[in-house]
Image (cartoon, rainbow, N blue to C red):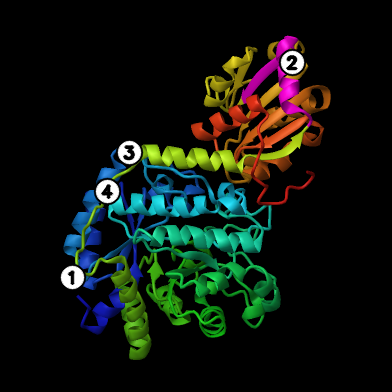
Amino acid sequence: MTPQTLEHKIGQFFFPAVFINDTEENIQATERLIREYNIGGLTFFHSRASAATNYENNKKIEYNDDSFDRLKKLIIRYQNCATTPLLMSIDAEWGLAMRIEKTPQYPYAITLGALPESHKSLVYEVGKQIGLDLKAAGIHYNLAPLADINNNPNNPVIGYRSFGQNKDKVADYAIEYLRGMNSVGVLGCLKHFPGHGNTNVDSHLGLPILNETLAELLENELVPFIKGIQNNVDSIMIGHLAVPALNDGKDTSATLSKNIIETLLRKQLGYDGLVISDALNMHSVSKLYTQKGKLEWEAFNAGNDVLCFAENVPEGIQEILKNATPQRIEESLHRIMKCKEKAGILDTKVTFSGGFDGAKTSNLNREIAQNSLTKIKDNSNTQLIFEGQKNNTLAKISLYKNADNAFFKVLKILPAPEFGIEKGAEIDDGFLEKMKLYDTLLIALFVPKAKPFHNFEIEDAVLEILKKWFETKKCIVYLFGNPYALQVLPKLNQAKGIIQVYQDFDEFQESAAQQLLENGACKGTLPVEIEGL
């Protein structure tokens, strides 16, 4: 099983991207890569349009309900081409649903970060369930979780994907997630070394620059990675971000920096596990070299063992063959084979174990909802709602989801007019006139997007009407979505009550409604600081 020729050994370092919903022509091209170059693994994405560098250009994504079955069939095809079993990988931070339709979805990391320390075992359970779901697909390597400390509210790409801004909590919860996956035989990955949280540039599209000194990084950003190293993390992904203080003042991406990988990560922090690059198609590095294979060589030379989303496999192999020492090739090969052995794929190339357990996923999501709900402001929320309903001055308003939602269904016990304002709907004078009849408003805000672009896509007209209501009425706000969206709501501090719910899953909506009816305790805490609150 261990590759014999030098070219085939080098081939193990390459993990090109493959797309579940791809053409037969593309699939056959991948099969040729596997046969001819003995590549080490594959990284699965849904489709070419959904890859992040394309996604930001709003290319149309074709959805396919058969994606999961296609994935399993592709894994069989690809493994059957391989002399050395392929390590199949995917970025499934919140479950296969991140990439594949009709598969289980779990809460975002920021939601898990709201859980109290006493319930961090739920993070372990999320890791475990995601691991089981991946094994059902034939995948044994999840490029997750993030160890990034999100301390920049304007971060365009990390945000909700981070456990928050408390370094110790991020470290603990990332390790719990990894332990959960490892418990069922799935490898994990801490990313994006040395820390992508305090950036305001999306590295899919440009190069973020961290201005911290090494001392500052050791005090904050590097804490979760150091804890991961102490706990023998399977792999660490290097981020496409520059840290001039570590590179003689140069804006060199960490992915291409010996100072960051070899000196800091390997020597100073003592990490001898697998190092994987972030996707090499990302614009922060992909446009640096015109010569094919040069980027792959530079990334390998900097210290990466695995070249993720490598786009120039034959040329990259030749560049490494021409320039690398035999010792370095053997070191990286040993790390990759050790991971394949741990994943249990060297003896049998294709295994699909178990299937999805919908009830277990739902129960886990409900338990997370019940323990992550966060009370930001409470001026007798429940009492105000009951009084408004009793006096016929209460209205329930759902923003960005129609009124036939799980939250309002549980609240049917409180008869009151319900209104739904969906995206793009016109807020006309007739509606505004009608709202004058009510002085107590229960507002369910389903934040349209998790990323902060354009105020999370909350329209200006909606922000304007919310401002007016907060100033003139008794408003109780339940926000379903990224908590950073709270800081784009004008005059929110004048709302009577604010409850942060994080996800719009039915389990979260139902738990939030139950909390309101019972005036129940909210056990969660905000994992990030929100300006103005």
Crowdedness near tag 4: few (<14), some (14–19) or many (≥20) residues, C-alpha within 10 Å: few
Q: Which mark is residue 354?
A: 4
Q: Earlier in the sequence, mark 1 or mark 2?
A: 1
- In front: 17, or 77? 77
Q: The residue tagged with tag 1: helix, strand or loop?
A: loop
Q: Earlier in the sequence, mark 3 or mark 2?
A: 3
Name the residue rendered at 70%, 14% in the picture: 389
- In three-dimensional space, the C-alpha distance between marks 1 and 3, rounded to whole angstroms, equals 31 Å
Q: Which mark is residue 280?
A: none
Question: Can the viewer see residue 429 in this picture?
Answer: no
Q: Which residue is mark 1?
A: 83
Task: Residue 327: give x, y in percent of width and height.
Answer: 35, 90
- In front: 115, or 352? 115
Q: Amino acid at mark 2?
A: Gly
Q: Is residue 525 left or right of residue 137?
A: right
Q: Which mark is residue 388?
A: 2
Q: The residue tagged with tag 3: helix, strand or loop?
A: loop
Looking at the rendering, the stretch of residues picked out in magenta corresponds to: 379-398
- In front: 109, or 80? 109
- In three-dimensional space, the C-alpha distance between marks 1 and 2, rounded to whole angstroms, equals 70 Å
Crowdedness near tag 3: few (<14), some (14–19) or many (≥20) residues, C-alpha within 10 Å: some
